[in-house]
Amino acid sequence: MARATTADARSGTFHDVSWSAAVFAGVLAGLAWFAWRILVSWWVGEPPWRTASLIASLVLGGDVVQLSKLFDPKVAGTAAIVHFGLSILLACILAPALTRLSMTGAIIAGVVYGAVLYLINLHVIAPLFLPWMTELSGVITFVSHLLFGLVLGYTYKLADAARQKSRLTRNT
């Protein structure tokens, strides 16, 4: 189990950051984000592969978005790698803060983190560097980012608590 120690600026004590819990939480939060986007896409009549095409376009370029009406394994695979890689990275960035918080605090921090990610990604980065991604701006994607953060905070705390309990059980 991968663990690192970070200082808690409030109390001067040390807390373990569970990187395996962060990876697990990142994957689940990424699944929640993607499932929400796909579900709502079908509900509002958008092509179901549109979101995958937009994510894959970060690596394959904006032209791949034109293919979004048809399933393409290369696009889907690229989208999965990019999306879950970013989800894990973003979870690892927030993990040290989540470690120090209560479950309620972690959920609130996760939701705020999701909102900040939405604002940065779709209202700063996309307009400047990825203009075709701005079509994701809107309530559906905002809610998906809030859901990402909520699942990230909640799942990290659960996974970290389970690992700590397991560690204590092995040590007694």
Image (tube, rainbow, N blue to C red):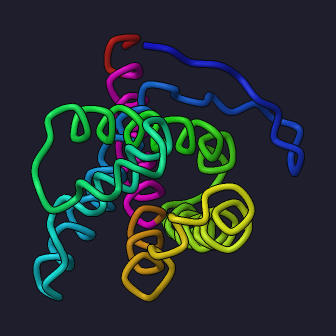
The quarter of the displayed image where residue 99 is located: top right
**Which residue is at a point 65% across and 41% down the rendered structure image?**
93
Horizontally, is 89 left or right of 53 in the view? right
Horizontally, is 45 left or right of 79 in the view? left
**Which residue is at a point 68% across and 74% down the rendered structure image?**
123
- Split into 4 quadrants, where in the image is the C terminus? top left
Asked whether residue 22 is in view, the answer is: no
Front residue of 95/73: it is 73
Whole-percent x, y for residue 89 in the image: 55, 36
**Which residue is at a point 60% across and 30% down the rendered structure image?**
17
The quarter of the displayed image where residue 170 is located: top left
Whole-percent x, y for residue 60 in the image: 43, 37
**Which residue is at a point 58% across and 36% down the rendered structure image?**
92
What residue range appears in magenta?
150-168
Secondary structure predominantly adopted by residues drawn in magenta: helix
Whole-percent x, y for residue 88 in the image: 47, 36
Give yes or no for residue 159 being in the magenta stretch. yes
Whole-percent x, y for residue 136 in the image: 45, 73
Does residue 34 lie above or below 170 as drawn? below
- Split into 4 quadrants, where in the image is the N terminus? top left
Count of number-bearing discs: 0
Front residue of 106/44: it is 44
Front residue of 44/115: it is 44
Asked whether residue 90 is in view, the answer is: yes
Does residue 1 lie above or below 68 as drawn? above
Does residue 134 lie above or below 129 as drawn? below
